[in-house]
Amino acid sequence: MRASRIAAVAVVLFGLGFAGDVGAQSCPKGKLRLYTSWPMQGAMLPEGTGMKNGVDMAVAEANGVVAGYCLEVVNLDDASPQTGKWDGAVEAENANKAVGDPLAIVYIGTYNSGAAKVSIPITNRAHMAQVTPANTYPGLTKKRGAAPGEPDIYRPGGFVNYFRPIPADDIQGAVAAKWAKRLGAKKVYILNDQELYGKGIADVFEATAKKIGLPVVANEGIDWKQPDQKPVLTKIRASGADLVYLGGVIETGAQVVIRQMKEVGLTAPRTRFMGPDGLLEEELLKGATCESALAVDARITFAGLPFEKMRGVGAKTYETYKAKYGKEPTSYALYAAEGTRVIIDAIKRSASTIEKAKDVTEKREAVRKAIASTKNFEGINGKWSFDENGDVDYDTMSGFKAVKADTPVGCKFAFETILE
């Protein structure tokens, strides 16, 4: 799987408590396919697998059948075998593969916001809904926190086909800056990985910090491909900054930054580390080492409630996942389940229109419209609705801290506070 561009196709034709082939299912209306696309190799393999599990779990809850249609899940890997990281050409290939399949009804992805920039216009032209478990860059859906021309440049058809059941970074970056000030930070040095998500959330953090009177020394892009980040860390040490905020994901050097912060003496209480939800992964602690993560008093923000604080649907989903897979869900596993449940609900509501449709474009359009009209959905963070941009109308955020733990890694990210 690590060396393959496309992960094995997972045809989900099982129910809760039984397994069988197509003939064992009642599929009078035929099949509908859900395509997924995110990295399934390298540092992202655990999260990629977690999101895949979330999709599979939601499909299994419906016994693999919705309104007379059997659901098949086709899992694609959008990472390059050469780099192990998401690749625009591979993501474009995946999106084109999906829209070219007459049985494909929805595209689930991506993990990286930069990859979403590539695939959204492709799925938009095909009237195919795209639902992400993890993208949080604001410009994909809204003008606030966006670059010029966004988000319209991703909508060549002039309509919204991209949806996310999680709040965007224009909220997360802002609450992070407020949390930093509340924690006593007096001077911040911001780093970013120069990618869409990392630079975007770093810019929001900077703007909010300045607005609330938290001095920012710099907002500097790093070359994450370099194994040595000590030159920039030496500058940070000389600046007197007492907090390093890094906008990035686990694929773009955060492990090295944290490890080398300790090596150059940038440790708490003199200097602490903070980052966004793209770093809320066990792989970060493995790569950075627990000793270094604890030394820099690492804190991470997350768009949503911690799993153990969820109630109702969220609590049940959390327990079901652990029972089914025998492990804790990764950061976005339950959001993958949530997005898939939204899709299944939309297929149910649009089934009669799908049946009457004269071609695949009309079928996809029926599902797209149904997803867009999702209101008062009973989700893992409570009841929510999509707004006109395809964003959720809640803004719950959490703060996590690296702590010692009796785990194979030796530490974990523990929930610390709700952020506002």
Image (spheres, grey):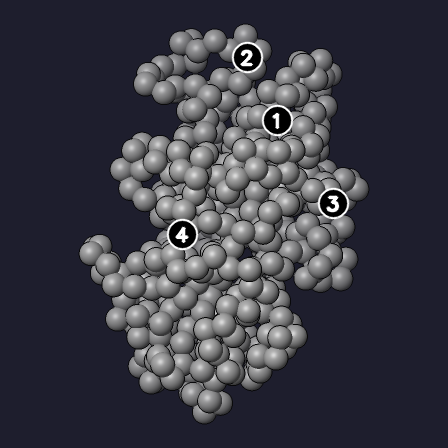
Dividing the picture into quarters, in which one does residue 25 lie? Answer: top left
- Secondary structure of the residue carrying numbered label 3: loop
Residue 266 image offset from top left, x and y in percent: 37, 82
Confirm whether residue 369 shows in the render.
Answer: yes
First in sequence, mark 3 or 4: give its number: 4
For the residues bearing labels 3 and 1, Cβ distance under 8 angstroms: no
Q: Mark 4 belongs to which amino acid?
A: Met
For this orientation, the residue located farthest to the bottom is 238
First in sequence, mark 4 or 1: give its number: 4
The residue identified by callout 4 is 44
- Secondary structure of the residue carrying numbered label 1: helix
For this view, does 44 lie left or right of residue 204?
A: left
* Distance CA(mark 1)–CA(mark 2): 14 Å
Vertical side of 223 occupied by 140: above or below: above
First in sequence, mark 3 or 1: give its number: 3
Name the front one of labels 4 and 1.
1
Residue at the image point whose x is 70% and y is 17% from the top = 353
Residue at the image point whose x is 33% and y is 85% from the top = 265
Residue at the image point whose x is 46% and y is 66% from the top = 275
Image quadrant holding the C terminus, namely bottom right
First in sequence, mark 3 or 2: give its number: 2
* Distance CA(mark 4)–CA(mark 2): 35 Å
Confirm whether residue 9 shows in the render.
Answer: no
The residue identified by callout 3 is 155
Q: Mark 3 belongs to which amino acid?
A: Arg
Image quadrant holding the N terminus, namely top left
Vertical side of 415 occupied by 104: above or below: above
CA neighbours of label 3 inside 10 A, class few (<14), some (14 to 19), many (20+):
many
* Distance CA(mark 3)–CA(mark 4): 28 Å
